[in-house]
Image (spheres, rainbow, N blue to C red):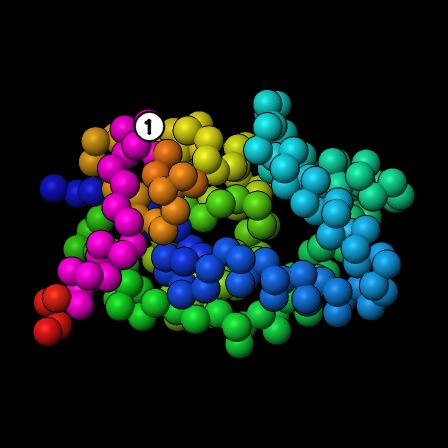
Amino acid sequence: MVFCYLFDLDGTLTENSDEEFIQTYFGLISKYVGDSMQTEKIKRAIFSSLKALVGKDDRRNNFDFFMDNFAKEIGSRNPDHWANFFMNFYNTTYNELRSFVKPRKRIIEVVEKLKKQGHKIVLATNPIFPAVAIEKRIRWIGLNPEVFDYITSMENSFSVKPSIEYYRYILEMIGFPPERSIMVGNDAVLDGICAKAGIQFVDISSIEKIICDKSN
């Protein structure tokens, strides 16, 4: 029987926690901007816009919603200007993040094995980054983005974790029933909420323990 396995990214396919990632990410934003006062202003606008995404209730995708909100928060220029600002960052300074990313090699091997067995594989990372940023991180952990049947990103998502609609929309897009879907993640709130959409939640620590027990 074919199943759909959804995998989170940070803390699941990587050993890096969300907190570690955020700290390094904003360090690179600061380097990219080059001005401490402007960096703080941008940082506040980012956090405010991400918070707004959680309560989002319209049909704009996350990318357009974020850029519109960010431009309002920052108080200057239009959304297109800031979209170009961020995309240039992801194509330049962001690449330095590669040395920071630590893949969970055993879990990545599990992903590749499941794919070879014919199962559906989804990267169900919180869609608060554009596709270019997410796909780079996929490659940095040693996977080809084509391994995934679906990858959530700002451009193709209309809600964020821990919204139940986020998970329902994924299943709608891939045409798969929740009763044959399993979400693998490290956060009982952001990932575990999938259970309310009928998707089984498995904590990454459980899988690592099984792998460890089998190898001993």
- Indicate the position of residue 100 as horizontal and vertical percent values: 52, 72
Q: Is residue 65 above or below residue 57?
A: below
Q: Residue at 17% across / 64% down in the picture?
A: 211
At 21% from the left edge and 31% from the top edge, which residue is drawn?
179
Q: Quadrant of residue 72?
A: top right
Residue at (46% x, 31% y) in the render: 163
The answer to whether one can see residue 117 in this image is yes
Task: Quarter of the image for the N terminus: give it.
Answer: top left
Image height of 199 relative to 89, above or below: above
- Which residue type does callout 1 highlight? Ala
The residue identified by callout 1 is 197
Residue at image position (30%, 43%) is: 183
Q: Is residue 4 left or right of residue 19?
A: left
Q: Give the class, few, some or many, for how many residues have Cα within 10 Å of label 1's Cα (few <14, many ≥20).
A: some
214 on left or right of 159: left
- Image coords of residue 33 (percent x, y): 80, 64
- Kindly state the secondary structure of the residue where label 1 is placed: helix
